[in-house]
Amino acid sequence: MQTKGLAGRPRKTKIPIDIRILSVSRWVREKREIIGMTQQQLAQELGLSQALVSRIERGGENISLREVVRILASLGGELSVVPMQYEPIDLSGASGRATEKRGEGS
């Protein structure tokens, strides 16, 4: 669903950030439990407090992408980015026009 933004242009509806955070948080907790690691062990490996690891797993901590990558790597995971919506841009017309304009002045 799209809504109207500034100047009446369509604005993409944003996914609430807590949904995305909870997905990563849930994965961290589940993976940590599967490999038999405690929050304290993970915290020590990352140089964080156990309380911070707990907040991260609950989705209650806003962490940087760099921290997400560090946490995933310490648990044997990796980050993949997949676009949720992809709209190809046709550049063939734009490059053709630029060439025509340059050719007209020669």
Image: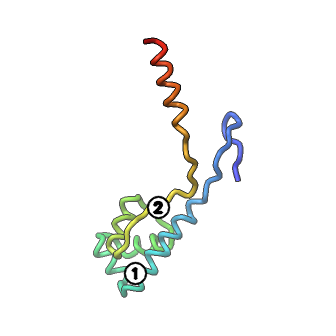
Which image quadrant is residue 52 in?
Answer: bottom left
In the displayed structure, would residue 61 be above or below residue 40? above
Secondary-structure class at tag 2: loop
Q: Residue at x 52, y 37 (%)?
A: 91
Which image quadrant is residue 42 in?
Answer: bottom left
Residue type at numbered disc 1: Arg
Left or right: where 60 falls relative to 44: right
- Say which mark, if any, is on residue 86: none
What residue is disc 1 on? 32
The x and y percentages for residue 61 are 47, 65
Q: Residues within 10 Å of mark 1 (few under 14, many from 20)?
A: many
Left or right: where 9 falls relative to 75: right
In the displayed structure, would residue 2 be above or below residue 93? below
Q: Residue at x 35, y 72 (%)?
A: 49
What residue is disc 2 on? 62
In front: 99, or 52? 99
Residue type at numbered disc 2: Asn
Give the label, 2 or 1, closer to the camera.
1
